[in-house]
Every structure is written in C-alpha cells, then in structure tokens.
Image (cartoon, rainbow, N blue to C red):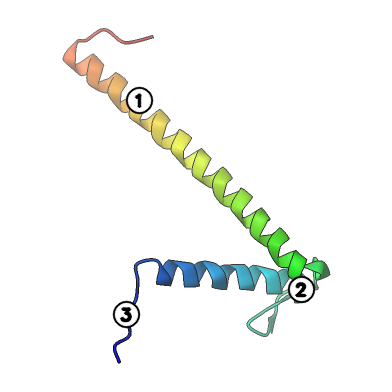
Amino acid sequence: MDIVFHTGDVPNALLLMLLGCVREWLSAGTVFGHVLSRPVLPMAGMPAGGFIVLGVLCAVWRTLAKKHKNYLTSEARGLMAVYRQKEGEPEDE
C-alpha cells in the first residue's frame, strides 16, 4: 500500500497545527505541554472558542496579505517611474 500525499496535505496540516497551538496557548497557557503564560482566554478551549480563534487568525492573515499587496503595488509603481525617467517617457499622473 503506497502513501500518496496531495499538494495541499502538508500546508493544511501546518495550518491545523498552528490553530491548535494558538488555541492551546489561549485556553491553557501552554504549547506542547510547556507553560508559556497564564490562560488568556479560557473559552478558547471550548468548541465555539476554536471557531473564534480561527476567525481571528483569518482576519490577521487577510490584513497581512492586504498590506503585502499594497507594498508590492507601491514598489512596482516606483520601479515604473524610474524606468520612465530613464527612457525619457512622460510620467502618468
């Protein structure tokens, strides 16, 4: 019997492990049994708390992705302005 890994298996497993670690840290103050702090959000240990933690992680991810996209867009515009100056083309306003 061969074990077949699909493309999304490893990233999905890493995301679930991240979600579990954040949820454990918030609810018990530990990660893999090592005490990091006191429990921050004990409700995260309940089933509904898992969905709340997932929603917060998704919101953080979307915010970081948007900031990265804006950064790349501004860098591309800056490079195009430099290219136009070198080529002697008029700049768009």
Screen quadrant of the N terminus:
bottom left
Q: Which image quadrant for residue 38?
A: bottom right
**43, above or below 79, in the image:** below
Q: Nearer the viewer, residue 13 or 72?
A: 13
**SS at badge 1:** helix
Between circles 2 and 3, the one closer to the viewer is: 3
Residue visible at 26% across and 7% down in the picture = 90
Residue visible at 56% across and 51% down in the picture = 61
Provide the residue designation for mark 2: 45
Q: Nearer the viewer, residue 63 or 87?
A: 63
Q: Position of residue 56 (x, y in %)?
A: 67, 54
First in residue order: circle 3 vs circle 1:
3
First in residue order: circle 1 vs circle 2:
2
**62, above or below 33, in the image:** above
| Disc 1/disc 2 C-alpha distance (Å) | 47 Å
Provide the residue designation for mark 1: 78
Q: Amino acid at mark 2?
A: Gly
